[in-house]
Amino acid sequence: MPATIFEQGVDAVSERTQNRAQKSERRLAAQLAEQKAAEAKRRRQAWISGLAGVAVVGLLVAVFVLVGPAGDDESNPTAADTPSADVLDPALKTRPTVEAGEGELTELVVTPLIEGTGPAVESGQSITVNYVGILYNEGEEFDSSWSREEPFTTPIGVGGVIPGWDQGLVGVTIGSRVQLDIPTELAYGADPGGGYPAGPLRFVVDVLDAQ
C-alpha cells in the first residue's frame, strides 16, 4: 500500500534529522582529531625544547669545567707559573759584559740591571738561569752558561749552590738580570781547592724561569 503524504513527510523529516546528526558527528570527529593533532604538536615542541635546554646546560657545564670560573684569568701569577714570552726582556738573549769590581768586598750586594715583570723567586724552587762568573778583583771569567750554550737549572735557597746565590736570588723576579757581588765567605772561601775559584766573585745572572 503506498505511503501516505503524512508518512512520506515523516520519512523525509527523519532522513534530514539523520543527515544532520551524521554531519554533526563528522564535525565533532574532525574537531577531536584537530585537538589531538594540536596536543601532539605541543608535546613534540615541549620535548624538543627540553632537549635543547639540556644541551645548553651540558655545554655550559663543559665550558665551566674546561675554562674554569669567570675571573680566573685576572688572578695574580704565582712564582710557580711559567713566564709568558713577554715577561722576558729581549736583552736577556744577549750575553752580558761583566767587568771587575773595585775596592774590598765585605758584604753581598745585589744590583738589578734589568727589572723582570714575572713573579718573585721563592726559596725551594728550581730556577733556570744564564750567568757569567768572574773573579771580583781581577775580572777573569771562570764560568759561564753562555759558553756551554745552555741555561743552568738548580734548586735555590736550600744549600744547593753557594750562599751568595741562595741569598741573592731568592726574591728576584723572573725576567730580571742581576749582578751579584759575593764576598769570600759567601762564595767558595779563601782556599776552596778542587778547581773552585778563591776570594770574592761577581756574577751577572739572568733569571729565566722558576718552578
Image (tube, rainbow, N blue to C red):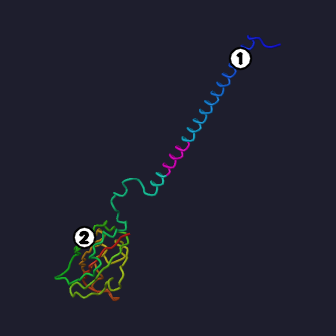
The secondary structure type at the circle numbered 2 is loop
Which residue is identified by label 2? 115
**Does 51 lie within the magenta span?**
yes
Q: Earlier in the sequence, mark 2 or mark 1?
A: 1
Residue 27 picture quarter: top right
Answer yes or no: is residue 155 visible.
yes
Task: Name the residue: 30% across, 80% down.
Answer: 131
Mark 2: give few (<14), some (14-19) or many (20+) Cα within 10 Å: some
Note whether 35 is above or below 126 in the view shown: above
**Where does residue 87 sit, x and y in percent of width and height?**
30, 69
Amino acid on which disc 1 is placed: Ala
Quarter of the image with the N terminus is: top right
Mark number for residue 47?
Answer: none
**How many numbered discs?**
2
Who is closer to the viewer here, 42 or 97?
Answer: 42
Farthest left residue? 103
- Image: magenta residue range: 47-58
Amino acid type at image mark 2 = Glu
